[in-house]
Amino acid sequence: MPQIRPFRALRFDPKVTGDLNCIVCPPYDVIGPELHEKLLGRSAHNAVRLDLPEIRPGDEPDDRYRRAGKTLTEWRTNGTLHKDLYAGIYVYEQTYRAPGSKKTRTQLGFFGRLKLETFGPGSSVLPHERTLSAPKDDRYRLMKATSVNTSPVIGLYADPSGKSVKTLKAIAATPADSDVTDDDGVRHRLWAVTEKGPCAGLVRALIEFTGRVPITIADGHHRYETAIRYRDELRANRTGEADPAFDYVLMLFLETTRQKLTVLPTHRIVRGLGDGGVATFLSRAPELFEVQPVAGRAELEAAFASVDVAPGGEGRFGLWTRQGGAILRAQRDSFARFLPQGGAALRRLDVTLLQTALDRLCKIDREAIAAGRLAYSKSVREALDWVDEVHDGADMAFLLDPTPVAEISAVATDGDVMPQKSTYFYPKALTGLIINPHEW
């Protein structure tokens, strides 16, 4: 079973930095160039300087990482960052509206350290996606230069008893230690709950409830695998150190059965088909789908505008071409003999069905996808605009419903991995509320 430990986090001191709203930032992998410049200009102490250090003219390849390490040392020395006196866990609440939704949602979890395990049979940490070498190399260079985790891995656990969520809610009913609102209007609150004093029992209880079942990585696979590489390198160079801090990674633990987590869909845009390829798909679509034409673009947008419209996992897709659109519903019996090998959970995913259909009807296989024949967007409007404007060779757009959280865990439990761009958990955990140093 997973091993979870409390820790002493590094946290920014508002007396030195000023308003924490100007210090926190999204995780590095959702920050584009324009937002990066905005964050750098927001504060000299913005956490983006650690998590996504800027590239300056004349920099050598590792200069940006060394600069982050130097900045971290300076901030620890001058009091910008302080290390908590006692170890504990950090309860985290996010209150938000999903894009396109009018409903307010709240999710609760906690930050702790998870002992690293290599993936494979017997592991209590389960992945659900493949990783790429370039992002892992970037995170490795940063970790080597700073010896900290600036952003967490997100882990899912199931506690049907509801005891862990009840405990989290009790803590969240007290005044928060940090309270910030990000640029998307998401409110983030944090409570430091130490293992010393009256809350020690709560810390032990949360760790016990969470550590009873395997953890599924929801987000942060690159960070997790980088932490293993970093651990293995340090193990090779050090001997005799019992239970070192680098054997652990910062994780945000989220319970999946007693609260509703939000997974946003990523829509697919097919490029380079030409009019003939589109016509072929339209003529052959009834081989795999029930096809319900829509009156126009507005009807299609409304059908996929929000995660509240459909639960996902029902084999429903929106199709848009310059000739019009339709709602497609998968005929699962027709798909059965074409689906890839794997467990039942992988084979029933909407993203698996769509990838199979594109291969079967458009000759867009994994090699074609790797070559760039698909583009991706989280915006319904943007996906349809690409087709209407023939942007970058776009010919068809497919709109998807979200992947149910239970299906993600089921795929991981079966030992399978999901197709690229299958999940986007929302909202993202902020960087800068806490930092995990590789030290006790």
Image: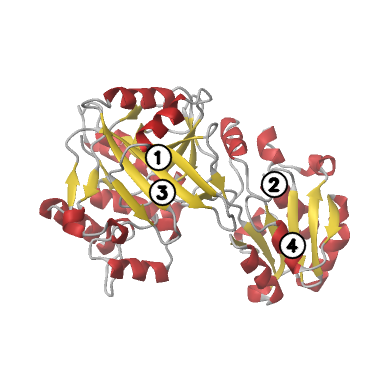
Looking at the rendered image, the quarter that the N terminus falls into is top left
Q: In this view, does 320 lie above or below 50?
A: below
Q: Which residue is drawn at 70% across and 51% down?
A: 355
Q: How is the image coloured?
A: secondary structure
C-alpha span from label 4 to label 1: 36 Å
C-alpha span from label 1 to label 3: 8 Å
Q: What element carries label 1?
A: strand
Please give the residue where the numbered disc 2 appears in the rendered image: 350
Is residue 1 shown left or right of residue 269? left
Between marks 3 and 2 in the image, the one whose residue lies nearer the viewer:
3
Image marks 3 and 2: residues in contact by CB distance under 8 Å: no
Is residue 396 shown left or right of residue 168? right
| Kind of residue at disc 2 | Asp
Q: Which residue is drawn at 75% across and 68% down?
A: 297
Is residue 356 shown left or right of residue 422? right
Image marks 2 and 1: residues in contact by CB distance under 8 Å: no
Please give the residue where the numbered disc 1 appears in the rendered image: 252
- Between residue 104 and residue 333, name the one nearer to us: 104
Residue 315: image location, x then y, percent: 74, 46
Please give the residue where the numbered disc 3 appears in the rendered image: 429
Residue 124: image location, x then y, percent: 46, 27
- Sort mark 4 into few (<14), some (14-19) or many (20+) by Cα contacts within 10 Å: many
Pointer 4 or 1: first along the chain: 1
Pointer 3 or 4: first along the chain: 4
Q: In which quarter of the image is residue 58?
A: bottom left
Image marks 4 and 2: residues in contact by CB distance under 8 Å: no
Pointer 1 or 3: first along the chain: 1
Residue 354: image location, x then y, percent: 72, 51
- Between residue 138 and residue 175, name the one nearer to us: 175
